[in-house]
């Protein structure tokens, strides 16, 4: 389940190949996408290969994991802006089918219900990409989130806001609430790839291997998925024993 690569670039090359294969074999595939620094080299590698191979991305559907509540899509720290800047603007996607939760909605709870419903109406997610927070959150599902949760509004933990503050301008407040796919939404994906790179993720990976399936460490739920892989670089695996992973 846990595979270690030499570095983040090797992971990006591997995952971008998987994305190319998924789309080539089924141009109407439904993908679950993530944001954050971990995903930037993945999207960069994918864009280069897709352009070179003239890959048709116009028919796929995508659903992003989460968005800050209260940030307009044009805000440079919104995940809508991130996806446009790091992926969507570089290839001929049909943006009508590229779904990023809106942080500007009148009724967030009703909107969340509609977002989960839209995933199901699209046929469910074939491949879900994930990163992981230092406290083990996936999406913005903080410790204590119920495993049967669907898309919902979440109060961000102090640790998550501290972790994400590096992306915001000095003195700019990190939003304290977000919309996120729920744990059930994530686990219903037919395949899951979680990527963790850098020594700052090593402690989270130690939590994963040292704990059973527990809401205290949300991403331990992946142990119950029959097609989930965790891809680490050597720094993220530095606290693990060699018998706990397979070297890719």
Image (tube, rainbow, N blue to C red):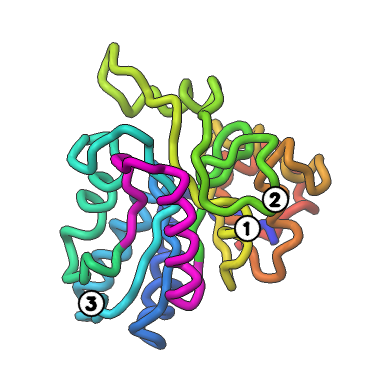
Q: Quadrant of residue 95?
A: bottom left
Vertical arrangement, residue 15 with respect to residue 74, above or below = below
Q: Secondary structure at mark 3?
A: loop
**Does any portion of residue 74 appear in the rendered image?**
yes
> CA–CA distance between discs 3 and 1?
28 Å
Q: Quadrant of residue 225?
A: bottom right
Vertical arrangement, residue 193 with respect to residue 202, above or below = below
Front residue of this view, candidates 198 and 153:
153
Name the quarter where the N terminus is drawn. bottom right
Foreground mark, 3 or 2, reads 2
Q: Secondary structure at mark 1?
A: helix
Q: Which residues are magenta?
A: 99-127
Residue at horizontal 26 percent and vertical 73 percent from the top: 50
> CA–CA distance between discs 3 and 2?
33 Å
Q: Secondary structure at mark 2?
A: loop
Residue occupied by mark 2: 147
- Number of callouts in the render? 3
């Amino acid at each position: 389940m846990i595979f270690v690569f030499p570095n983040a670039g090797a992971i990006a090359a591997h995952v971008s190949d998987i994305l190319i294969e998924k789309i080539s074999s089924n141009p109407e595939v439904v993908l679950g996408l993530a944001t954050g620094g971990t995903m930037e080299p993945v999207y960069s590698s994918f864009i280069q290969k897709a352009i070179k191979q003239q890959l048709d991305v116009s028919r796929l559907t995508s659903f992003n994991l989460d968005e800050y509540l209260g940030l307009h899509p044009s805000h440079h720290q919104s995940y809508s802006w991130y996806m446009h800047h790091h992926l969507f603007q570089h290839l001929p996607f049909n943006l009508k089918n590229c779904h990023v939760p809106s942080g500007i909605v009148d009724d967030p709870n009703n909107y969340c219900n509609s977002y989960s419903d839209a995933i199901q109406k699209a046929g469910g997610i074939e491949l879900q990409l994930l990163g992981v927070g230092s406290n083990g959150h996936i999406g913005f599902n903080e410790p204590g989130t119920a495993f049967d949760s669907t898309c919902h509004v979440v109060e961000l933990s102090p640790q998550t806001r501290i972790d994400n503050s590096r992306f915001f301008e000095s003195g700019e407040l990190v939003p304290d609430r977000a919309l996120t796919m729920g744990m059930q939404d994530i686990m219903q994906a037919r395949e899951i790839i979680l990527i963790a790179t850098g020594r700052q993720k090593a402690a989270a990976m130690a939590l994963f291997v040292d704990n059973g399936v527990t809401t205290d460490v949300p991403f331990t739920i992946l142990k119950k998925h029959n097609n989930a892989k965790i891809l680490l670089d050597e720094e993220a695996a530095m606290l693990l024993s060699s018998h706990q992973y397979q070297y890719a």
